[in-house]
């Protein structure tokens, strides 16, 4: 949001009544000040007053789009973000990033895919923003896959662990989906063997462990991932991404990246993916160090800044870039 205040001298009418000169300018200054102070609910309140007396004011769509997004009123935010796209071509890609972030919050994943695809096909995205939009498209694809995936297998008889190992990856996923829908309580032994088997994909093992958690499995299991091990009782585990360390990381990232909602959305998804893949283990270092590493990772993705070659940074990169461990 620009800091430059504009000179405004024209009169405005509300119905048959002329609004006192200076009222619109004063309210717009107040709305912009509220945005600068991150008092988004106050910015919404003032902007709604402006809508009553100056509905065609060019600054309003951008202010309302951001303020509604920050207050999680995503339907309203989408309406004004669309208006912002049409009203201010100088801020088109800033408005577009916000519009796409809102669509993803509303699970309008097909619209995001169509929009980014069209922008890329037309070659209109500035070179310095192209990688950000490509990564945003990849994230949207993950979310679309998760949202639309519908395992519709009918319940089948319980298979042995040996038979499970003979299945391909897709069949294994479908089997676990079948057990989630019907039969996990009767397949705890199979799920326990899957959860502790080091050679199976980490995400499959996470799914098995979550199913054991949900069925109240109380026998201890030793889970090894990424060269570390942890003894756990499944029934006592939080869900992936809901542990105290993950929550602290999310809070730290929201504080540091709140000015860039599309970047924040991408990095939060990378954290969720890691939490799912590595479950029940975390990053093995304090939350502050993890949040800082993800900030470095975001700079690597969006600005091309070299990624520090520490074990933590390498692990974050490998997990996030491995499509075989995509969150589905």
Image (cartoon, grey):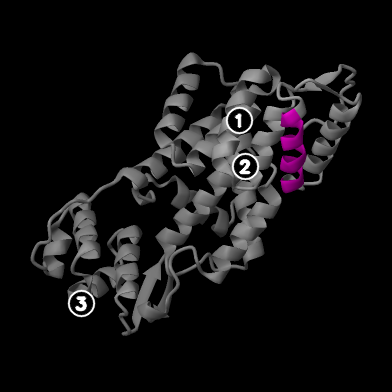
| Residue located farthest toward the front when viewing the structure as drawn | 16
Q: How many marks?
A: 3
**CB atoms of marks 2 and 1 within 8 Å:** yes
Q: Earlier in the sequence, mark 3 or mark 1?
A: 1
Q: In the displayed structure, would residue 83 be above or below residue 153? A: above
Q: In the displayed structure, would residue 267 be above or below residue 31? A: below
* Camera sees residue 161: yes
The residue to which callout 1 is attached is 81
Instruction: Name the spot of residue 126 as percent of width and height, x first.
Output: 61, 21
| Residue located farthest toward the top when viewing the structure as drawn | 122
**Which label sits on residue 158?**
none
- Main SS of residues in magenta: helix
Alpha-carbon span between mark 2 and mark 3: 46 Å
The residue to which callout 3 is attached is 189
The span picked out in magenta is 41-52
Instruction: Name the spot of residue 165 as percent of width and height, x first.
Output: 17, 62
Instruction: Name the spot of residue 154 as percent of width and height, x first.
Output: 12, 56
| Secondary structure found at label 1 | helix
5 with respect to 274 (left or right):
right
Disc 3 versus disc 1: nearer the observer: 1
Q: Residue at x 30, y 69 (%)?
A: 211
């Amino acid at each position: 949001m620009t800091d430059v205040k504009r000179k405004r001298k024209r009169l405005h009418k509300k119905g048959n009544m002329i609004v006192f000169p200076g009222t619109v300018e004063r309210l717009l200054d107040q709305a912009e000040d509220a945005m600068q102070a991150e008092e988004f609910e106050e910015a919404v309140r003032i902007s709604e007053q402006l809508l009553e007396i100056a509905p065609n004011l060019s600054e309003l769509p951008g202010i309302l789009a951001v303020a509604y997004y920050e207050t999680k009123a995503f339907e309203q935010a989408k309406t004004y973000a669309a208006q912002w796209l049409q009203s201010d071509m100088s801020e088109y890609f800033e408005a577009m990033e916000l519009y796409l972030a809102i669509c993803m919050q509303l699970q309008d994943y097909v619209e995001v895919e169509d929009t980014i695809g069209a922008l890329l096909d037309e070659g209109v995205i500035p070179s310095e923003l192209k990688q950000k939009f490509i990564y945003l498209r990849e994230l949207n694809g993950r979310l679309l896959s998760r949202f639309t995936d519908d395992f519709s297998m009918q319940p089948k008889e319980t298979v042995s662990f040996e038979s499970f190992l003979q299945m391909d990856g897709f069949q294994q996923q479908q089997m676990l989906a079948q057990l989630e829908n019907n039969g996990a309580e009767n397949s705890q032994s199979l799920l326990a063997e899957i959860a502790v088997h080091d050679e199976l994909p980490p995400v499959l093992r996470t799914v098995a462990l979550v199913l054991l958690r949900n069925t109240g499995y109380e026998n201890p299991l030793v889970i090894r991932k990424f060269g570390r091990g942890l003894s756990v009782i499944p029934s006592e585990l939080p869900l992936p991404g809901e542990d105290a360390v993950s929550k602290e990381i999310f809070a730290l990232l929201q504080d540091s990246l709140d000015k860039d909602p599309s970047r924040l959305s991408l990095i939060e998804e990378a954290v969720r993916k890691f939490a799912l893949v590595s479950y029940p283990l975390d990053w093995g270092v304090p939350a502050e160090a993890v949040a800082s590493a993800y900030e470095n990772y975001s700079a690597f993705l969006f600005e091309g800044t070299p990624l520090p070659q520490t074990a933590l940074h390498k692990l974050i990169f490998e997990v996030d870039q491995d499509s075989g461990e995509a969150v589905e």
